[in-house]
Image (cartoon, rainbow, N blue to C red):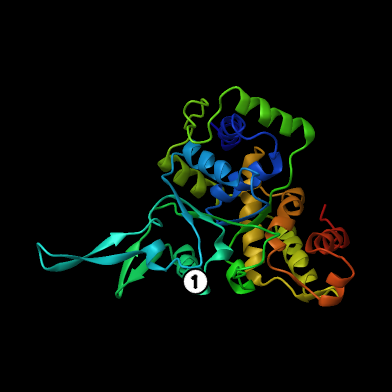
Amino acid sequence: MSIEAKVQSVRSEIGKVISGQHDVVDQIIASTLANGHVLLEGVPGLGKTLLVRTLGHVFGLEFGRVQFTPDLMPSDVTGTMIYDASSGKFSFRQGPAFVGLLLADEINRTPPKTQAALLEAMEERRVTVDGVAHPLPSPFIVFATQNPIEFEGTYPLPEAQQDRFLLKVLLRYPSPEEEVSVLKTHHAGFSPQNLELAGVQQVISQNELLELQQEVKTATIEDKIFSYIYQIVHATRDNRDVMVGASPRAGIALMNISKAFAFMRGRNFVTPDDVKEIAPAVLRHRVTLRPEAEIEGQTTDDVIKRLLDSVAVPR
């Protein structure tokens, strides 16, 4: 079965419990195929936890969730050394990070020290406790959520730490039809705590996912696409509304996620449309606007859209 067919099966299973949000679903599937972490932003009640848990179930990944709070310590995420009185030795007790898919809920509510511990695990795919490195499962993917409207008692992620996320995905309110569908689904007895009763099935195993991730890396990219990616990233550094543009890591992220989108659409080569479609999710957390632009009411997505329109699309 092709990646395109498998992705369609994943979409169908997720669609059993998530109404609408088609672009969001495609973006998180693509990030999983690209083995990248995702920052999910949206107001409470949009189904972020349900979406991620369903994704893990469909891909056969062990799911873990950590509710980030101001008193959360790094060891509460990564694990700690425990003394065993019977043996007289210390042993390592794994933290909740030792899963295939970790939901870091409200990551901006925990202090920078704990944020940094998680982000180290994201980058290195391992945790170090008392000088001993402990590898995390493969794959290890983090979905972190944050609320865009509550800032009291929060610790915003610095730009350098946001850069570790492959995508920043925005969840918006559903359409009227989609929200009515949600009401009917819950009226019919759906329980978010029991995906099996909703008929959600695993369609890809953990080993199959690892194979798909390797296959995605083989996508063909022509020189003109490399140039197009560079021009988009460079345009963020040469704009009067942008104070800090995207780094080369943004170009690498845009290339990798474009490969996943290509395979999801039944191709083993990347097109300019793949790049342009996913560019806002790759760049929105890697670009810092000037205060003057924000005062004028511009958003990062507004600026990125203009940048994409200004860069010539290769033929």
Of 194 and 290, the residue lying toward us: 194
Which residue is under mark 1?
Answer: 116
Determine whether, in the image, residue 16 is placed left or right of residue 102. right
Tell me which residue sits at (38%, 58%) in the image.
136
Judge whether 306 appears above or below 49 on screen: below
Q: Residue furthest front?
A: 152
Badge 1 amino acid: Ala
Name the spot of residue 37 as percent of width and height, x first: 55, 57
Tell me which corner region of the image, top left, top right, bottom left or bottom right, holds residue 182: top right
Name the spot of residue 179 as percent of width and height, x first: 72, 34
The answer to whether any part of residue 220 appears in the image is: no
Tell me which residue sits at (69%, 48%) in the image.
171
Name the spot of residue 90 as percent of width and height, x first: 19, 68
Tell me which residue sits at (12%, 64%) in the image.
85
Name the spot of residue 298 as percent of width and height, x first: 86, 65
Determine whether, in the image, residue 295 is placed left or right of residue 234. right
- Badge 1 density bin: few <14, some 14–19, many ≥20, Cα 10 Å: some
The answer to whether any part of residue 149 appears in the image is: yes
Marks counted in the figure total 1
The local secondary structure at tag 1 comes to helix
